[in-house]
Image (spheres, rainbow, N blue to C red):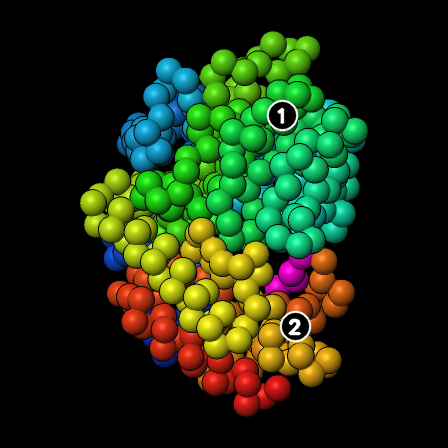
Amino acid sequence: MKDKKIQNLIIAEESRQKSVVNLIASENYVSDDVMNALGSVLNNKYAEGYPGARYYAGNEIIDQIEELCQRRALDTFGLSDKKWRVNVQSLSGTPANFAVYSALLPKGGKIMAMELSHGGHLSHGHRVSMTGKFWQQIPYGVDSKTEKLDYDEVRKIAKKNKPNIIVAGYTAYPRAIDWKRFREIADDVNAILMVDMSHIAGLVAGKVYKSPFKYADVVTTTTHKTLRGPRSALIFSVRDRVAEKTGEDFATKINRAVFPGLQGGPHQNQIAAVAVALKEAQSDSFKKYSRQIILNAKTLASELRQLGWRIVSGGTDSHMVLVDVWNNGEVNKKGVGGLNGKVAEEFLEREGVIVNKNTIPYDKRKPTSPSGIRLGVAAETTRGAKEVDFVKIARRIDEVLRKNI
């Protein structure tokens, strides 16, 4: 590379990544094949529109790539093209969610989604997000004692507020989600059921987490977390649901919202890299990897709990573990606070363990210095870590945090 400053920074970042224990739940490591597709000549092509309906010439091969990505997306999750369609052009998760709302909700419509501090995502209608400025969020949360979803309470909130769309799927909720219950609640209030499976998509593909597709009307997902692909997003929608007033199917409206509504030309190198990652996700080795993720997460949660740390909701059913570092068992008995999440994050980073600060349900602290940290095991599992390694990681976390309390 002629630009030595950028080259050196890339080398430095590569060295950093190799030298740390990466427990960021939103991160993973892609294969060389995915990386090669991202850095290919496909970056040079502009392709506004969709396959067979481009606004530029020279897209015969590009159309084949995008159509292949669409087929692989459906195949990876066991979906029939007679029932489902998929848009592969969204640049990332938040734009994908915004596109769905733009397509299917009236201005000022109601998005019923999990409260941010309980594990929801900014793009689910939070007030600081543009999704909360165009639409109204109706928040729901978890039970204060179990820190798990209370579906009866969710139903009560839905019946009271009559949302246009109900969002299930979260950014910091480690437990299994009952998709059927959400379907029943959505049907009770005639709402669209949207699932954002960004964090668990790889687990669904690997068949270690129950699929939402039997129950959802729309499913969005990023492709870079447990799915182990590039930074991108997919939007799945059922063919037999039609939008009110226009009578158009959801996919037609969503496609129009993505382009020309929110984006210009898609990133075809990104789409090709997604197609590569989707093929990888169909392999037996990926299913083995997914099973190992669950084993590693449960091991991490169990070991930290035995070491005296309070695990939010008591455990995990996914790739992530939420730890209460402010009110952990030993410190709480003394009647004083422990570490806030920001400080815990900083102490761990100094020792080469990368996590992120995170609010916990009913957190009394501010989001900038919350009570918890979020741990994810997908990246280290990609590197080959097994249960014995996560026992060591848990003990390392414990050692670092306790010497700083």
- Residue 160 x, y percent position in the rendering: 79, 29
Q: Label 2 sits on what residue type?
A: Asn
- Of residues 393 and 205, the one nearer the viewer is 393
Tell me if residue 354 comes above or below residue 76 in the rendering.
below
Position of 350 with respect to 337 (left or right) is: left
Which secondary structure class fits the magenta region best? loop
Position of 212 with respect to 38 (left or right) is: right
Q: Secondary structure at mark 1?
A: helix
- Numbered circle sitting on residue 116: none
At label 1, counting other C-alpha atoms closer than 10 Å, the crowd grade (few under 14, some 14-19, many 20 or more) is: many
Q: What is the C-alpha distance between the residues marked 1 and 2? A: 36 Å
Tell us which disc is closer to us: 1 or 2. Answer: 2
207 in the magenta segment: no
Disc 2 designates what residue?
327
Q: Label 1 sits on what residue type?
A: Ala
Q: How many marks?
A: 2
- Of residues 162 and 104, the one nearer the viewer is 162
**Can you see residue 91?**
no
- Of residues 249 and 187, the one nearer the viewer is 187
Magenta residues span 357-361
Going 42% across and 79% down the picture, which residue do you hit? 395
Going 34% across and 58% down the picture, which residue do you hit? 295
Going 78% across and 29% down the picture, which residue do you hit? 161
Disc 1 designates what residue?
186
- Specify the quadrant of the image occupied by residue 9: bottom left
Q: Secondary structure at mark 2?
A: loop
- Residue 35 x, y percent position in the rendering: 31, 55
- Residue 342 x, y percent position in the rendering: 63, 74
